[in-house]
Amino acid sequence: MKRFVVALVVFSLFTGVAFGMGMHVNKKAIVVAAFGTSYPTALKAILNVYGKVKAAFPKVDVRLAFTSSIIRRIWHKRATDKLFKREHPDIPKDIYNVRSPLALLADMSDNGYRTIAVQPLHVTAGEEYNDLVNVVEGLVSIQALQLKNKPFRRIVLGRPLLGRPGIYEDGKTYHEDLKIAAEALKADAEFAMRKHAALVYMGHGNEHRSTGLYYELQEEMSVMYPKVRIFVGTVEGHPTLEDVVSALKKNKVRKVVLKPLMVVAGDHANNDMAGNDKDSWKMVMKREGIRVMPVIRGLGSMNAVANIYVQHLKDAIRWAKLSF
């Protein structure tokens, strides 16, 4: 018994020292930060991008975070819902305990991760992205008298699908990102062309800053795919649904392929876009005599789009001159 107690004490001291030493090492990790979704079917789009990031960095610890507190609470509640789990056996266990970027980064700091690359799965540099920027900048700004006690050495942040403001480290701007994104959406344009229909995207948008980026994407795609009439609208901001419908009527469009310009095809896609309520995009267009073909598929499910997020992450790491 005495030998067991002595051994236990020695083990505790050793692991305590090892943990203390681990607190001052500079481990590296990647965080994929998505808004999140409560729809199990839509979750596959996030997991597709997440899987590609892990495949691109097989030797690095890659974690997933959701920026939406509402979505996180839904999954945390489902963690004790046995019926839901039986009905959705393919959902990874980590999803039920998904953290916010702030909480996840704090935990990672406690476990010795000092250099972290964060890749957002946002489409534009809107509210969610800017909140994430503030979290990252706030954490990096925390100082300590000794470098070993500083919570983080470096946190680099990748850019959204359609880029971010400013000139990039390689001298390019979001205009290049728009072109690359338009190229990645080629399959959508070709599908609409085969159906002899116009292509209409529903983006999220926001009310507090310009959403002119959607107009620019529409123009880029229209030039790239001249045989397809392409229109982009937003749930919030401009262009509005009314703007899109007006443009469809002006161009005498009678048939459209309707898709979400969002990483996931969740609540907005299933209800605001393709729902049967009288104010959904589908029903509003139908009342105008337009035949609507909804496609409930998020951008993250498209490998060409998922690969863009991976490249944006690689760019952020390379521009920061980090090795992962």
Image (spheres, helix red, strand yellow):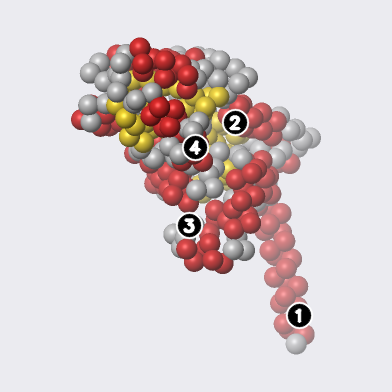
In this rendering, would 62 be left or right of 188? right
At which x and y percent is residue 312?
44, 30
Between 177 and 246, the one lying in front of the other is 246
Q: Is residue 317 above or below residue 222?
A: below
Mark carried by residue 5: 1
Between 42 and 171, the one lying in front of the other is 42
Contact check, label 4 and label 3, Cβ < 8 Å? no
Contact check, label 2 and label 4, Cβ < 8 Å? no
Residue designated by label 3? 91
Residue designated by label 2? 128
Between 321 and 279, the one lying in front of the other is 279
**Residue drawn where x is 56% and y is 67% of the image:** 82
In this rendering, would 186 be left or right of 89? left
For discs 4 and 3, the disc positioned in front in the rendered view:
4
Question: Badge 1 local density, few (<14 within 10 Å), some, or many (20+)?
Answer: few
Q: Amino acid at mark 4?
A: Asp
Which numbered disc, 4 or 3, marks the residue that appears first in the sequence? 3
Q: Amino acid at mark 1?
A: Val
CA separation in Å, label 3 and label 2:
25 Å
